[in-house]
Image (cartoon, rainbow, N blue to C red):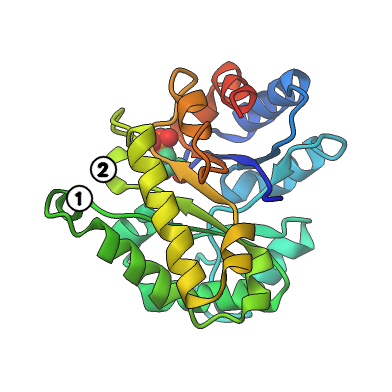
Amino acid sequence: MRSKIVAGNWKMNKNAAETEALLTELSAKLPDTQAEVMVAPTFVNLSSAVRTLESSAIEVIAQNMHFAESGAYTGEISADMLLSIGVDTVIIGHSERRAYFGETDEILAKKVKAALAKNMRVMFCFGEELEDRKSENHFKVVESQLKNALFSLDASDWGKIILAYEPVWAIGTGETASPEQAQEMHAFIRKTIADAYDTSVANKVSILYGGSVKPGNAKEIFGKPDVDGGLIGGASLVADDFVAIIESI
Ligand SMILES: O=C[C@H](O)COP(=O)(O)O
């Protein structure tokens, strides 16, 4: 059975004290759930987050990493650095990394390989822009994002991959894909993986939806058969909202 996952991507929000406060509140309010619950605070607060959540079921994950082992890459973070503080899951390919930091499919493919080489889990994000959807090019775009970054992996690597489909037009905009649009794309993603590998790989990979998921729409989106959870931005910064979203799965 595929894992259900609800992950909060805090992006560039919350200082040290605020991180501690939100994690403490979340831990105290965490409901009983079948889902894996993850949070991705900023790099500077990762170590303290791991310590704060030591005896909690919430997993701390990273928002990004570099593909190189180490070296002259000012401002960057390696897989070994994350592993050394107890973080073994990393988000790769978020649309904000693609749009604002020039991360291409080629760079992302290198990052995915580097993380897998260290036995890390990868939460790979992808999704079309508004123009792609308007021109009905969205399936092609998504297919090529998957192909370019992931389809040179061995089938055995897919046990370490989580997918997060995030239509860029729905991120932080308040506009969500309808549950039907999410399901349609998730089913397409699973079929694309089945065609490239086989159905056993496709049926085992968790595919999360991200883009303006809120307490009010989470249940309907998570209710779709190919939606295995969510990657939550804004609503993960408010403990009660994030908890309500976890309760919706
Ligand atoms: O990583 C999370 C996504 O970018 C979704 O963000 P959002 O929930 O604020 O739209």
> What residue do we see at 13% from left, 48% from top?
134
Q: Position of residue 175 (x, y in %)?
A: 28, 30
Q: Can residue 177 be seen?
A: yes
Name the element at disc 2: helix
Amino acid type, mark 2: Trp
Nearer to us in this view, 102 or 20: 102
Ligand 1's image quarter is top left
Of marks 1 and 2, which one's residue comes earlier in the chain? 1
> What residue do we see at 74% from left, 29% from top?
33
Q: Position of residue 98 (x, y in %)?
A: 34, 61
- Can you tell which mark lies on residue 133? 1
Amino acid type, mark 1: Arg
For the residues labelled 1 and 2, the Cα–Cα distance comes to: 9 Å
> What residue do we see at 60% from left, 59% from top?
203
In the rendered image, the residue lying farthest to the left is: 135
Please rate how many residues cluster around mark 2, counting C-alpha atoms within 10 Å: few if below 14, some from 14 to 19, many from 20: many
Q: Is residue 187 above or below residue 236?
A: below
- Horizontal side of 167 relative to 90 (left or right) equals left
Please rate how many residues cluster around mark 1, counting C-alpha atoms within 10 Å: few if below 14, some from 14 to 19, many from 20: some
Residue ID for mark 2: 169
- Residue 211 in which image quadrant: top left
Mark 1 in CB contact with mark 2 (< 8 angstroms):
yes
Q: Position of residue 64 (x, y in %)?
A: 53, 59
Q: Is residue 69 above or below residue 50?
A: below
Q: Position of residue 160 (x, y in %)?
A: 67, 65
Q: Is residue 214 above or below residue 52?
A: above
Nearer to us in this view, 29 or 150: 150
- Residue 169 in which image quadrant: top left
> What residue do we see at 59% from left, 42% from top?
41
- Can you tell which mark lies on residue 76? none
Name the element at disc 1: helix
